[in-house]
Amino acid sequence: MSARKIIIDTDPGQDDAVAILLALASPEDLGLLGITCVAGNVPLSLTSKNARIVCEAAARPDVPVYAGSAAPLARPLITAEHVHGQTGLDGPDLWEPAMPLADGHGVDFIIETLRRHEPGTVTLCTLGPLTNVAAAFNTAPDIIDRVQEIVMMGGAYFEVGNITPAAEFNIYVDPEAAEIVFRSGAPITVMPLDVTHKVLATEPRVEAIRALNTRVGHFTAEMLDFFERFDVEKYGSEGGPLHDPCVIAWLLQPELFSGRHVNVEIETKSDLTLGMTVADWWGVTDRDANAMFIGDADANGFFTLLTERLARL
């Protein structure tokens, strides 16, 4: 079977970086057509730099990396240096990437790629705010029906919020973009905090990655050493949740996850619950289901997959 064609839309971020590495380590399963960057965890100048650093760490400077949207559709940008550090990839020693950004805008790349490939053959993997995808859908609505699937990290239901009491960061940064995507009719699978908070980078799991004794192994372990400190302090957990790699792991081994096909609406008006993903988990409305909302994961299986794949790089 041929590799599944994907675009990764991202705002790296340590966990974004691990997701990119997992995809790059799985070429027989995933054909990475390109990476589009968006402002989110840190500003666009840093997310587009960080994506290239990650590609170089994996010795894959051939992957095109595009700069996309520098701000949400209708709001000022909110960033998360308090979680990811001033670079977005604090932890390892970073460098100036030698590989250039690809020519053109990330939104145009999404549009052109979906139009160029056969309908239903390109999956969008979104690891940050949904600004680029929403902008592409607004600009070229003809591409919506060409999307095979959108697999996103974002939102929460039982775990509520991590940036406000009600909202998860990726959705909160650009709720209008999220509303456009969830109402688009494209097939959607969501990795919310409900599942990512069960996939914890505990000390033994991080040490197993470090013990690979490779450039990528050390790079990843050093990122996770820094990244976990915020969530361990916040939640009192045994390790930081590894959010974004769940998107890639779903494509590689969906049997590691379970969830429900439910309706998800995005709150865009309320000051109190702005950016909330209102998931009809119990089916109490008559709204049509529009997303597979993942609720559980086999964390040990996830880290076995991640470690085995990172060992290839």
Image (spheres, rainbow, N blue to C red):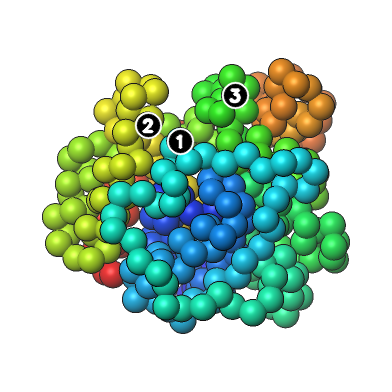
Badge 3 density bin: few <14, some 14–19, many ≥20, Cα 10 Å = some
Identified at 38% across, 30% down, the residue is 231
Mark 2 crowdedness (10 Å alpha carbons): few <14, some 14-19, many ≥20: some
- The C terminus, quarter of image: bottom left
Tags 1 and 2 in contact by the CB under 8 Å rule? Answer: yes
Residue found at x 54% / y 48%: 42
Q: Nearer the viewer, residue 62 or 86?
A: 86
The nearer-to-camera label among 1 and 2 is 1
x then y, percent, for residue 271: 75, 21
Does label 3 or label 2 sit earlier along the sequence? 3
In this orientation, does residue 12 appear? yes
Marks 1/3: CA distance?
A: 14 Å
Q: Which residue is mark 1?
A: 82
> Which numbered disc, 1 or 3, marks the residue closer to the eye?
1
State the image coordinates of residue 178 (x, y, percent, origin top left): 72, 43
* Amino acid carrying mark 3 in the image: Thr
Q: Earlier in the sequence, mark 1 or mark 3?
A: 1
Q: Secondary structure at mark 3?
A: loop
Q: Secondary structure at mark 1?
A: helix
Residue kind at label 1, given as amino acid type: His
Instruction: Name which residue type carries label 2.
Output: Phe
What label does residue 128 carry, if any? none
Residue designated by label 3: 164
Does the rendering let one see residue 297? no
Q: Quadrant of residue 275?
A: top right
Which residue occupies 41% across, 43% down? 85
Q: Secondary structure at mark 2?
A: helix
Q: Residue at x 26, y 50 (%)?
A: 222
In the rendered image, the vertical position of residue 61 relative to residue 157, given as above or below: below
Residue denoted by label 2: 230
**Where's residue 135, x and y in %?**
78, 57
Give percent across and percent down for residue 210: 18, 53
